[in-house]
Image: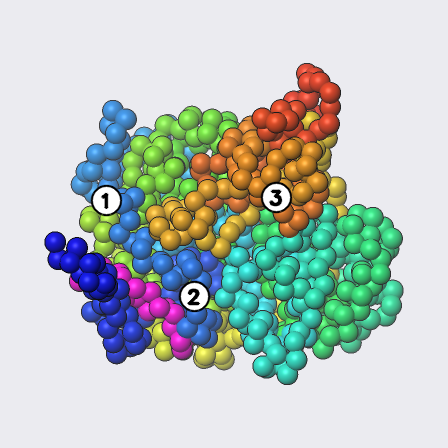
Amino acid sequence: MIKKIKNFLGLDIKEDKYALVDDPFFGKVAKAKAPDKWVRSTCGYCGVGCGLYIGVKEGDPVYVKGDPDHPVNRGTLCPKGLSEHEMVRAPTRLPGAMIKRNGAFNQVSWDEAFQTVSDKFKQIQAEHGKKSVAVISTGQLLTEEFYTLGKFVQMGLETNNYDGNTTLCMASAVMGYKQSFGSDGPPGCYEDFSHAEVIMLIGANIADNHPILKLHIARNQKVRGKKPTIIVVDPRHSKTANMADIYLPVKPRTDLALINGLCYIIHEQGWMDEKFINERTAGYREFIKEIQKYPPQETAHITGIDVKTLYEVARLYAGANAAMSAWTMGVNQSAQGTDTVSAIVNLALMTGNLGKPGGSPMSITGQCNAMGTRESGFTSSIPGYRDFKNPSDRAEYARIVGVPEELVPSQRGYAYPQIIEGIEKGEIKALWVVATNPLVSYPDQPRLRKALAKLDLLVVQDSFMSDTAELADVLFGAATWSEKTGTYTNSERRCNLARKSVPNYKDSKSDFHIVLEFSKYFEGKHELLFKGWKEPEDAFEEWKRVSKGRLCDYSGMNYDKIEKLGGIQWPCNDEYPEGTPRLYTPDMPTRNTEGRPKFVFTDWEPLPEDVCEAFPLILNTGRTVEQFHTRTKTGTIKILDDLAPEAWVELNPADAKKLQVQSGDRIAISSPRGRVENVIVRVTEVVREGTIFVPFHFNTQLVNTLTQSLFDPKSFEPNYKQTAVQLHSEKVPEGILLRQKKSAGALTFDRSAVTKKETNITNQAVGN
């Protein structure tokens, strides 16, 4: 009645709902959720590593505000960061430990869950060997948790069949850096965006995927007094391409040929930095001999970029006092991703763009702590970038942590795709999946699901009921961001502190405490590996000792110092007490045998699965700014879900005309592996004719049903970006092919060229 009277009198009946109050920290905030306190922390989404404050009211997170003093984001946040608090108490959260009985999950005590899983692991390993248990981890844990998990898996469970889902996004950058520098580790920093005269973004849609980095580019004019020249290399005219002074719409996966061709022109014209090459690099003569295969006319033919533009781009890049190249998944997620990364490094070396402000080849990381697992996680190397195969590295690690040397693995086990193949072959009987969702993120979903059905035991450790969690036999319900303390390391090697600000959800435990307590169910392992450990800081202190003297040196850090400085970039030690913005400056040698960065040449190869009559278009997949990965977090947040509730297909107007569809229509997409129905159409010139784009986040239109089991042979990263597909609509059932009748051959595809590459990958050499 009161509401009706207020409405009749013209009063604002929602005044209380939208009322503001003065907050002493951030000014005006909503009265209904004015925080009791603010906790300084770090965003838990992408690898940019933004600082923020979490507003807490009555034990729940109710606000997120950007940290104005943090050097990464200076108070700004993207839509995901601003709404991050809304996923912490989501209805999809797991309440604790759960066991599936008669097809339904029942919450149980942690003791029952740990006892059940440990008994089954022991039984399986007794019957089939230690390596019959495998673990797939994530890029979302804290460094302390990565270190603890990796240590337990490798030396507690004694299986080296252990990898992370970072193999699906960053492994090619890792292996490319190793080829060129002898070690992983991005050489540059975000500050370089503000100092570079030329910025080349290759397969990097930062406007959608890392929008805060645009602010660093925007600062360039303030720092230098004039705008930089921005070059964007991408088959798709993304939002980032709208920033470009020069846009290079290369044909799909021809970036390696493009970089090789630019290097040819720079050498041909004498635009290289000979002093830098002679004094600071190795392998240049051999490289120049090989690069002669890429004259401008040939490069133009391969890439679709005209000769005049190739010369202009080469001139601008080589002529700049400082030029920066940055890339993300458009480079990494390719069957030639590793070698494309090394090609980008080659371009930097030819022009002297290494170890100086504004001059660097820089990978932009996908997940909040992909760097943390690369350094400490015990997946592709012994922590601290040590080599499994190096006896002195193994002995050194064993001595530091006090374990028998024979317990330290002498070789890397199976990488992520090899683990899936090992399940197919019956070698792996149990799988422990930690904070990742392969039933959306992994390629060739039909093949994956057949493999997982063969397992004797699937354990999923996650904060949310994901697609993969629904398939599990046992669930370890984990705490999430804001419920635990530890560190993340971002794309520029900056170690940031994330603070616990609210109690754990129900009976969930942090990933650190799950591993710590689970280890007690394996005789002698807890005492050997984690004696005296109680909190994540205990793991951090050991990690500091393990990393000391290594390239990724954390020995000069502590939690208070990290928080005070707004993060610290490794190496941080007595020589660099406040961290190091750039690697491989003149006084910092590389970690390869020459002590110098090395030119690495590789030939470009055509697409293994190219278009054909039955599948005449190329599918490209990627992300959108509103969603993150497989939506286990962002799918629960109303404002983000309203903005992007389902997948769509971007279709060029010429192809839309052939298919007789327009924006808003729905079509199906098929490949040799499967079919995805009911995808809404967006007709746009963002994509070139003969190509389409679909975001991969959505399980409702599961685009990874279509993608292929083709992997980079060095990094094992999937080739997500180039899949041959067909489109289908009710108006033109044949698809976009203008054929008069259906034929048996219309749905066939000669896979003989790719089948060998798609299978039996376990026999390939694994780089360390």
Q: Residue at x 56, y 60 (%)?
A: 206
Please say whether residue 60 is one of the residues in the magenta stretch.
yes
Residue situated in front as seen by the camera: 755 or 619: 619
Question: Residue 301, relative to residue 210: is it above or below?
Answer: above
Residue under pointer 3: 683
Numbered range of the magenta stretch: 52-70
Which quadrant of the view contains residue 216?
Answer: bottom right
Residue situated in front as seen by the camera: 392 or 618: 618
Dot 3 or dot 1, earlier in sequence: 1
Q: Residue at x 38, y 65 (%)?
A: 42
Q: Position of residue 21 (x, y in %)?
A: 24, 73
Dot 2 or dot 3, earlier in sequence: 2
Q: Residue furthest front?
A: 8
Please say whether residue 736 is one of the residues in the magenta stretch.
no
Using a 10 Å C-alpha cutoff, classify the residue at mark 2 as few (fewer than 14 neighbours), some (14 to 19) or many (20 or more): many
Q: Residue at x 21, y 34 (%)?
A: 106
Q: Position of residue 701 (x, y in %)?
A: 48, 36
Question: Residue 686, relative to residue 125: is it above or below?
Answer: below
How much space separates mark 3 and mark 1, taking CA atoms?
45 Å
Query: Most prominent secondary structure in the magenta stretch?
Result: strand
Of tags 2 and 3, which is closer to the observer? 3
Say which element carries label 2: loop
Dot 1 or dot 2, earlier in sequence: 2
| Amino acid at the residue labelled 2 | Leu
Using a 10 Å C-alpha cutoff, classify the residue at mark 3 as few (fewer than 14 neighbours), some (14 to 19) or many (20 or more): many
Q: Is residue 595 left or right of residue 350?
A: left
Residue 96 tag number = 1
Determine whether label 3 and label 1 are within 8 Å by CB: no
Decide if residue 703 is in sight here: no
Quarter of the image with the N terminus in it:
bottom left
Residue 77 tag number = 2
Q: Position of residue 556 (x, y in %)?
A: 42, 75
